[in-house]
Amino acid sequence: MADPELCKYRSPLTSRYASEEMAYVFSDMKKFTTWRKLWLWLAKAQKTLGLDITDEQIQEMESNLTNIDFDQAAIEEKRRRHDVMAHVHTFAICCPEAAPIIHLGATSCYVGDNTDLIVMRDAFDIIMPKLARCIQRLSLFAEQYRSQPCLGFTHYQPAQLTTVGKRACLWLQDLCMDLRNMDRGRNELRFRGVKGTTGTQASFLELFEGNHDKVELLDRMVMELAGFKKTYLVTGQTYSRKVDYEVLQVLSGLGASVHKICTDIRLLANMKEVEEPFEKDQIGSSAMPYKRNPMRSERCCSLARHLMCLCMDPLQTAAVQWFERTLDDSANRRICLPEAFLTADILLSTLQNICEGLVVYPKVIERHIKQELPFMATENIIMAMVKAGANRQECHEQIRVLSHQAGAVVKQEGGDNDLIQRIRSTPYFSPVHNQLDHLLDPKTFVGRAPEQVDKFLEEEVKPLLKPFSHQMSEISSLEL
């Protein structure tokens, strides 16, 4: 008989792709143990500030943080049609002494919203080192190939030469922006705190008999127990749903960066200049045994598109919230927030794997350069001829004619670019025949690309990676 789990839909984000650590962050166990911690922290702070809560009640709650009867919770929720109250009653069953003070003065969003903020913070702490490792691996690649000339492309047409390492720095620059945005997004997350049903803290003011100082201190104490430095000073029943949008906007930006990088790699793989890792027994196609499809990069592009779209959910949710809160945010957030982080997680694991195994084929790159460089070198040849005493306009016309003849060979006959052979066999250009090899040296066409690589890595990349120096060693292995 088939496993019952195989007879219902499972999200591939958790069953196929994402890491165990990220899957746990968005698990029921993480969510509901965090709810219990929040109830414990609230009770501890309330006791400290003078409410009639005993050490025994606190100890009972602490002893049952992970003792969750999920079957009982499901029964309670079916009965009460309220997920938070279902877990209040489930917690109370294993904490009979503490039952009267669990969730005291709080609203559902005390556990719901604060847990979401804790979970997003913890999820950022997982993906930021992964992004840092991608940057570090790609920076090593850029350094190794800082001086390797290759064709540049504008409009996907051959353009002035660049280097393999300089192109990698364009990728790196986007990823560095993403890491800075993540750092800012993570550190700007605040705690919703202890705010009550509509954000006025009225229930807590009643508990503390009108003592505003104690209510403010309660908010601060619970915030510190949760590991935050600031709370949102004003909220409705929920924290502003624009916070979710700001978080997913950061992740969507990462999706755009990864999509661009992996698209470039796919195009380079088609040209056979650069390839992602390809394992010894890996099969590229069931029908065509010779194929080496860039499936890692294709996976990244596929998932990146999903990630980029997700930021529209919280944007629209923020726009349609009525007054202090409406519940039409809940079901949407249960989907888009986890999916965004789970998708970002697998994108970065896959990108790291790609960056750790990129293969460059210099001979193929050299052949492509030779096909295009003669046309690019014409201006240098004209300048050399003028220095040798030739008339610039006459020289331009001579090269124009020869260039069109060579172009016809390439386009109409499918032959190699023979412009240089034509120049060598034309007596008019005899003054520069002995200079042609130097004039066609690819390294003289890359400008300051190698120096730009060095400066960028030294001044931009290395300082950004310093906070992650102790997290650089982990290798990314994928289940393909």
Image (cartoon, helix red, strand yellow):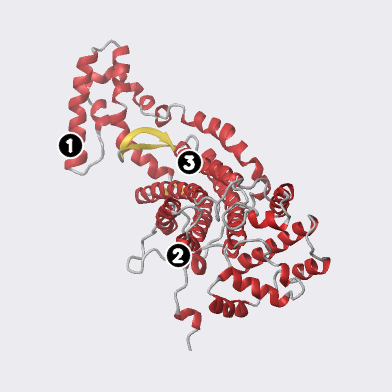
Q: How far apart in space, not on screen, are marks 1 and 3 (Cα)?
A: 40 Å
Q: Report the front residue among 119 and 437.
A: 119
For label 2, the crowd category at 10 Å Cα-Cα, with few meaning under 14, some 14 to 19 and many 20 or more, is few
Circle 1 or circle 2, nearest the eye:
2
Residue at screen point 52% across, 67% down: 14
Which residue is the extreme one toward the top? Answer: 389
Compared with 80, 115 (above or below) is above
Compared with 13, 399 (above or below) is above
Q: Is residue 275 visible?
A: no
Residue denoted by label 2: 282
The answer to whether residue 195 is left or right of residue 171 is: right
Which residue is the extreme one toward the bottom? Answer: 1
Circle 1 or circle 3, nearest the eye:
3
Label 3 sits on what residue type? Asp
Label 2 sits on what residue type? Gln
Q: Which element type, helix, strand or loop, lies under badge 3?
A: helix
Residue 67 marker: none
For label 1, the crowd category at 10 Å Cα-Cα, with few meaning under 14, some 14 to 19 and many 20 or more, is some
Label 1 sits on what residue type? Ala
Q: How far apart in space, not on screen, are marks 2 and 3 (Cα)?
A: 31 Å
Q: Report the front residue among 410 and 208.
A: 208
Residue 194: name its quadrant. bottom right
Compared with 173, 480 (above or below) is below
Q: Earlier in the sequence, mark 1 or mark 3?
A: 3
Q: Report the front residue among 292 and 214.
A: 214
Residue denoted by label 1: 408
Residue denoted by label 3: 174
Q: Earlier in the sequence, mark 2 or mark 3?
A: 3
The answer to whether residue 190 is left or right of residue 380 is: right
Q: How far apart in space, not on screen, are marks 1 and 2 (Cα)?
A: 41 Å
Rendering coords of residue 455 (x, y %): 55, 30
Circle 2 or circle 3, nearest the eye:
3
